[in-house]
Amino acid sequence: MSRPADLSGDVTGLLTAIVEALDMPMPSIHEDDEREHYRLLERRSSDVRIALSVLLRFPGSGALDDTIQDLRDRTKRNPVTYTPFASEEHGGDE
């Protein structure tokens, strides 16, 4: 994946951490999995919003690196625990 030339490595790192936090597999069609997916997405979205708010309020030396690490730590603390959706392939010649 190529990086846009006008973004610094640190900004690209922040954007990557945000994508990693919010990029979750779709849940299975079971209601419990859908509910857990929604809760996890809500939790991770809140984590991203809070981290970005703190970064904007307290920008300083090392703040961007700290925000990236904080987002990655929060994402690890809130793993996907629901069953991801699995498509069933039907038919076809093999």
Image: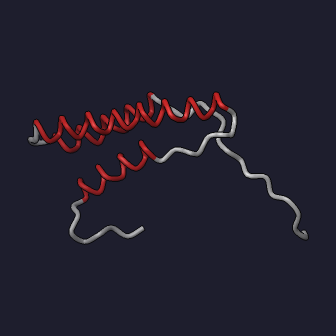
The quadrant where residue 45 appears? top left
Q: How is the image coloured?
A: secondary structure
Nearer-the-camera pick, 48 or 73: 48
* The C terminus lies in quadrant: bottom right
Left or right of 37? Residue 3 is left
Q: Residue at the spot x=57%, y=45% of the render? A: 25
**Number of dots carrying numbers:** 0
Q: Residue at the spot x=23%, y=64% of the render? A: 7
Q: Residue at the spot x=42%, y=35% of the render? A: 75
Nearer-the-camera pick, 72 or 94: 94
Nearer-the-camera pick, 29 or 14: 29
The quadrant where residue 55 appears? top left
On screen, residue 31 above or below 7? above
Furthest residue toward front: 31
Q: Residue at the spot x=87%, y=68% of the render? A: 92
Left or right of 45? Residue 51 is left
* The N terminus lies in quadrant: bottom left
Left or right of 32? Residue 48 is left
- Residue 80 image point, x, y percent: 55, 34
- Residue 62 image point, x, y percent: 15, 41
- Residue 33 image point, x, y percent: 63, 32
Nearer-the-camera pick, 76 or 24: 24
